[in-house]
Image: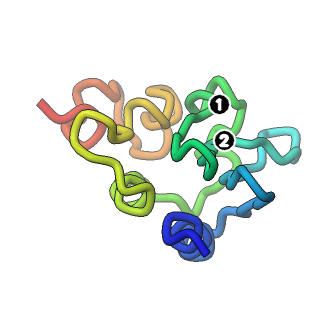
């Protein structure tokens, strides 16, 4: 089996995300505010590429409502672990800012402005 696929399955288990696998695609699934499953991050096994459906606003998954267990520290670690699992190199990696909407982060982290929070957007 593909080591990236194995790592994504472990990542899903660690952070309580459903992982959907078929012969060519592995997806990280999150529930949106309507309780529906949304494909959030996709790894294409065949061409070894990764994509995402957007940030938490674009996908309407608003973690501050749907995943109260995801603290700022857990989300920071999730993004780091995601980049490692996908074996992304500098310049290709996901950032917290790319995956988590600033308004979602403000609620999760209890900050007034996400862009003033060094954890969200490191200087």
Task: Please give the residue where the numbered disc 2 appears in the rendered image.
Answer: 40
Quarter the C terminus occupies:
top left
> How many neighbours does mark 2 have within 10 angstroms: few (below 14), some (14-19), or many (20 or more)?
many
**Given contact means CB atoms under 8 Å apart, are the residues at marks 2 and 1 in contact?**
yes
Residue at the spot 49% in from the left edge and 38% down from the top edge: 107
| Image position of 4 (left or right of 38) | left
| Image position of 3 (left or right of 32) | left
Quarter the N terminus occupies:
bottom right
Q: Nearer the viewer, residue 30 or 71?
A: 30
Q: Secondary structure at mark 1?
A: loop
Residue at the spot 52% in from the left edge and 41% down from the top edge: 49
Task: Please give the residue where the numbered disc 1 appears in the rendered image.
Answer: 53
Where residue 62 appears, x then y in whole percent? 64, 38
Q: Quadrant of residue 14?
A: bottom right
Q: Secondary structure at mark 2?
A: strand
The type of colouring in the image is rainbow
Q: Is residue 122 above or below residue 71?
A: above
Whether residue 74 can be seen here: no
Q: Nearer the viewer, residue 35 or 3?
A: 3
Disc marking residue 44: none
Total labels: the figure holds: 2
Q: Is residue 30 above or below residue 58?
A: below
Q: Quadrant of residue 95?
A: top left
**Residue at the front extreme, as displayed:** 46
> What distance separates the C-alpha of mark 2 from that of mark 1?
5 Å
Where residue 17 appears, x then y in whole percent? 66, 63
Q: Is residue 114 above or below residue 24?
A: above
Whether residue 103 can be seen here: yes
Where residue 66 appears, x then y in whole percent? 70, 50
Q: Earlier in the sequence, mark 2 or mark 1?
A: 2
């Amino acid at each position: 089996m593909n080591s990236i696929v194995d790592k994504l399955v472990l990542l899903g288990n660690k952070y309580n995300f459903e992982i959907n696998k078929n012969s060519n695609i592995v997806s990280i699934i999150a529930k949106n505010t309507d309780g529906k499953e949304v494909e959030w991050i996709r790894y294409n096994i065949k061409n070894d590429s990764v994509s995402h459906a957007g940030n938490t606003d674009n996908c309407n998954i608003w973690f501050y409502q749907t995943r109260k267990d995801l603290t700022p520290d857990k989300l920071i670690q999730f993004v780091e672990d995601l980049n490692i699992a996908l074996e992304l190199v500098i310049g290709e990696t996901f950032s917290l800012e790319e995956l988590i909407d600033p308004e979602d982060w403000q609620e999760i982290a209890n900050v007034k402005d996400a862009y003033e929070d060094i954890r969200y957007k490191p200087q």
